Image (cartoon, grey):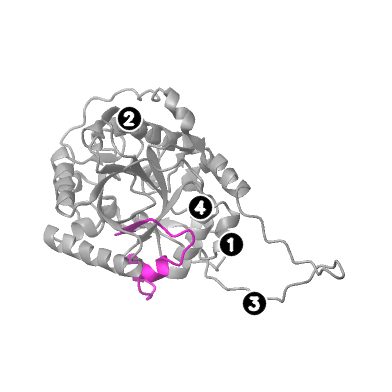
Amino acid sequence: MKHLSRRSPGAAVPGWLLVAVTLLLPPILAGCVEDEVRELGAQDAEEAEVEVAEEPEVPAVDTLTITAAEAVARTLAEATPPDTLPVAPDTGLVEAPPPAPAPRYNAGEDPEFAARHGWPVQGPAPLPGAILPANRIVCYYGNPNSTRMGALGQYPKEEMLSRLRNQIAEWEAADPATPVKPCLHMVSVVAQGEPGTSGHYRAIMQDETVQKVYDWVKEINGIFIVDIQVGTDDIRNILPRFEWILKNPDVHIAVDPEFYMKDGTPPGRKIGHMDAADINYVSEYMANLVREYNLPPKVFIVHRFTQGMVRNAGDIRLRPEVQIVLHMDGWGAPWLKRDSYRDYIVREPVQYTGFKIFYGNDTRSGTPIMKPEEVLRLRPQPIYIQYQ
């Protein structure tokens, strides 16, 4: 849940100007006190601390992977060269074409700008059963035990699912050529303002709560995303405990760098970050699940609304078994969201892109939320859409 600072169009956003919504509301951190943790349905007690899991062994099949930087270089190398100017046969002089007015685009909408930066990324070919890029995912985000974390928990179940269906219908009308995959995106490990019993400033939701939301997904023939806010822990400690649900073919993963506090700072006091090494650990773990359980490819969402939230992005490895989405999830007026999409997603290609709409926070400046038709003008077009 993020806030994009106000700035002039085209200017880079200084890190000190970017303020997370969670800095405004300790309750949205969902648990600065024990009562809030219990309200969210966290595990009553943490298990004994375990050593950091070893990096997964890379099997021979991993030779199919390439880094994001390599994929972008391949895309640029394969780009079609500009047409050769016509030559006048009688003089041998180059005929200058008549000048054409240059089209004007909002930030993030210029297809030539996107192409110059390597879009669409020529990553591994999608495997059978892959969701992307043939479908668009449209999600409701939140936690079922909190009305303040997003649309998923803001309304009673039936009303929430009805609202999601209506939102999906808008996307289907705006882009009939792209099927929509319904999705519930649950924050299953929630960053905390206090260390809690684990000492890591995060609360793991009860398995029964996670299963409940997964059951809701089946009612809409959708997919389920397990979202992890790491706190001061390590993703290598947390991810394996969710294998019980991630081994299902319709369950996917997300990690939020905002709440990955590598230096031990409590979440909400500053914006955290993930390195490519952390992202590669998650993607290889998920790839191993795909191979072990004979699953279709997994979708892996990485949140981003500042430059520093994802470091060494060019070193992120793209694997056939995992489809990585860099998801612009800052809030603000439409012009500011487009600016941030251009600066933090388009300029640094990885594989696929996502875009977040806040029903409440995006309207704080008096502007309406962006409609599907407006989001579809972005280049590349976001293939993952999240509502909070």
- Horizontal relation, residue 134 to residue 147: left or right: right
Q: Check residue 368 for magenta coloring.
A: yes
Please, what secondary structure does the residue beneath circle 2 have?
Answer: helix
What amino acid type is highlighted by mark number 2?
A: Arg
For the N terminus, the image quarter is bottom left
Q: CA distance from mark 2 to mark 1?
A: 38 Å
Is residue 1 shown above or below 162?
Answer: above
Residue named by callout 4: 120
What amino acid type is highlighted by mark number 3?
A: Pro
Which sits earlier in the primary sequence, circle 4 or circle 1? 1
- Please name the predominant secondary structure of the magenta segment in the image: loop
Instruction: Give the image location of residue 261, x and y in percent.
Output: 40, 40
Instruction: Give the image location of residue 129, x and y in percent.
Output: 31, 43
Image point 49% across, 39% down: which residue? 316
Q: Residues within 10 Å of mark 2 (few under 14, many from 20)?
A: few
Does the rendering let one see residue 150?
yes
Is residue 228 shown above or below 22?
Answer: above
Q: Check residue 384 for magenta coloring.
A: yes
Q: CA distance from mark 3 to mark 2?
A: 52 Å
Residue named by callout 2: 291
Q: CA distance from mark 1 to mark 3?
A: 15 Å
Image point 28% across, 30% down: which residue? 240
Q: In the rendered image, which quarter is residue 245 located in?
A: top left
Which sits earlier in the primary sequence, circle 2 or circle 1? 1
Residue segment shown in magenta: 360-388
Residue named by callout 3: 101
What amino acid type is highlighted by mark number 1?
A: Glu
Q: In the rendered image, which quarter is residue 383 located in?
A: bottom left
Q: Residues within 10 Å of mark 4 (few under 14, many from 20)?
A: some
Q: CA distance from mark 4 to mark 3?
A: 26 Å
Please, what secondary structure does the residue beneath circle 4 have?
Answer: loop
246, 156: nearer the viewer = 246
